[in-house]
Amino acid sequence: QVQLQESGPGLVKPSETLSLICAVSGYSISSGYQWGWIRQPPGKGLEWIGSIYHGGSTYYNASLKSRVTISEDTSKNQFSLKLNSVTAADTAVYYCARDRIQDSFDYWGQGILVTVSS
Amino acid sequence: QSALTQPPSASGSPGQSVTISCTGTSSDVAAYNYVSWYQQHPGKAPKLMIYEVSKRPSGVPDRFSGSKSGNTASLTVSGLQAEDEADYYCSSYAGSNTYVFGTGTKVTVL
């Protein structure tokens, strides 16, 4: 069974960098699929942030592209998200998920709430 | 890349059917047969209910069905049950390995 688990700081100061890791079990991220990040501000809808394909190809939401970096660590079977220059508008629950490539997201982590506040 | 448009709310009595629309553009919903639907209960992660417009993942009841016409996709929940009360989001592939989600619909079982 594929399982994903997000981890990282729950509180980030404005203008700093948000860093999260998604640990994957039950499937090797180097075996296929893409791996993505999606966020959900409190009480609002879902927003796709970006995805990574094994080997390093990355795809980002145009609205966040200038601030986002997604990378992989195949030795640890995990991938990560970095979002720099954060503001209060970046406060959200951040989910990692398996991306079926040009299709849908079939396995999701439980989500992690990240609050941007001084 | 604007969010797909969904009605804020929908409701039905147990046993009835409810249909949720998801309107996009010629660059997303109309262009690709890669519309998916997610169910989200409060405080939980979204769950994939429909992919590729009308396909159901293993374990999803056949009460859930999807369709598409032009730039509008739809999710129908037949035989409504109490546990179907949740938020539902559509999503579409939008080209160049990008995705767009819908605004979300809260389904209430009366």
Image (cartoon, coloured by chain):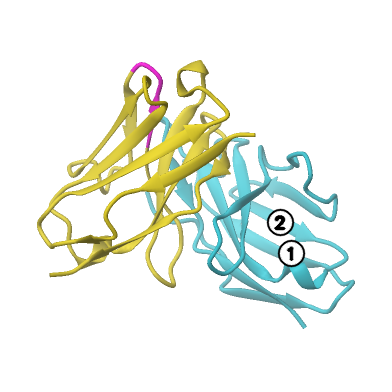
Chain colours: A yellow, B cyan
Q: Which residues are magenta?
A: A51-55
Which numbered marker is on residue B27? none
Amino acid under label 2?
Leu
| Residue at position x 63%, y 36% in the image | B33
Q: Which residue is mark 2?
A: B75
Q: Position of residue B52 (x, y in %)?
A: 66, 37
| Residue at position x 38%, y 21% in the image | A74
Chain letter behind tag 2:
B
Q: Position of residue B73 (x, y in %)?
A: 65, 51
Q: Is residue A86 above or below residue A20?
A: below
Amino acid under label 1?
Thr
Q: Is residue B60 above or below residue A100?
A: below
Q: Which residue is mark 1?
A: B19
Q: Decide whether the magenta segment is chiefly helix, strand or loop.
A: strand
Chain letter behind tag 1:
B
Q: Is residue B22 above or below residue A79?
A: below
Q: Is residue A52 magenta?
A: yes
Give the farthest residue toward the bottom.
B110
Q: Position of residue B31 (x, y in %)?
A: 54, 37
Q: Quadrant of the C terminus of chain B?
A: bottom right
Q: Is residue B63 visible?
A: yes
Secondary structure beneath dot 1 equals strand
| Residue at position x 74%, y 49% in the image | B66
Secondary structure beneath dot 2 equals strand
